[in-house]
Image (tube, rainbow, N blue to C red):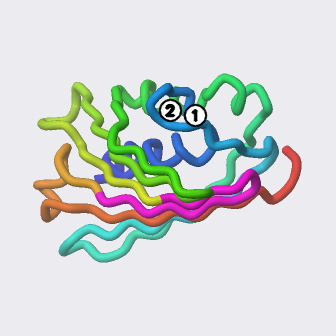
Amino acid sequence: MIRMLALSSAAVLAFSLNVASAQVPKINSEPGKWSYSTRTEIPGMGSIPMSFEQCVTQKDVDEGRNLAAQKDAGMDCKYQDLKVTGNRYQFTAVCTGKNLPEPMVMNYDMTASPSQFDARMTMTGGNTKAMGGKMNMTMSAKRVGGC
């Protein structure tokens, strides 16, 4: 379960900083120290909060290095059904990986600015059948200063 949370957190985090993909627009972020709070809800297991901080450099933003977290976790994601309205981003990510029995399908609804964002994600597939079939996650992040 912890690995599943880490993979889904990496997937949400991928969009919090900058996405270097032609399918998803670049979401500009300010470099610096970012503070993240997540809450994952799994049927029958309740709500699991997590928080962490990460230093984001300008090089990270420019190179889209946040996607490396997914690739390091053995995930390959494709993005589809993109809808952008002002600073609101809605899209679907379909991710495959060698440790997943089937693709993970993650539907995102995200509001972002250069210094903060809020995201909601619903995930099905992957390992979610073993956890009730569906997982919901919310994440909020804000830039809290320099690194």
Q: Position of residue 48 (x, y in %)?
A: 40, 69
- Which residue was labeled with disc 2? 69
Residue closest to the eye, 21 or 9 = 21
What amino acid is at disc 1?
Asn
Q: Is residue 86 above or below residue 91?
A: below
Task: Name the image quarter holding residue 35.
Answer: bottom right
Q: Please state if 32 lies on the left or on the right of 8 as rendered.
A: right
Q: Position of residue 117 (x, y in %)?
A: 62, 60
Write the residue at 40% across / 31% down: 73
Q: Position of residue 137 (x, y in %)?
A: 39, 63
The number of callouts visible is 2
Q: Is residue 73 above or below residue 53?
A: above
What amino acid is at disc 2?
Ala
40 is within the stretch colored magenta? no
**Magenta-tinted stretch:** 110-122
113 is within the stretch colored magenta? yes
Task: Name the image quarter holding residue 76.
Answer: top left
Q: What number is the disc on residue 66? A: 1
Q: Is residue 106 above or below residue 35?
A: above
- Check disc 1: other Cα within 10 Å, few if <14, some if 14-19, many if 20+: many
Q: Is label 2 in a helix, a strand or a loop?
A: helix
- Check disc 2: other Cα within 10 Å, few if <14, some if 14-19, many if 20+: some
Query: Are the residues tagged 2 and 1 within 8 Å (C-beta)?
Result: yes
Residue closest to the eye, 1 or 120 = 120
Q: Quadrant of the C terminus?
A: top right
Q: Please state if 126 lies on the left or on the right of 52 as rendered.
A: left
Q: Is label 1 in a helix, a strand or a loop?
A: loop
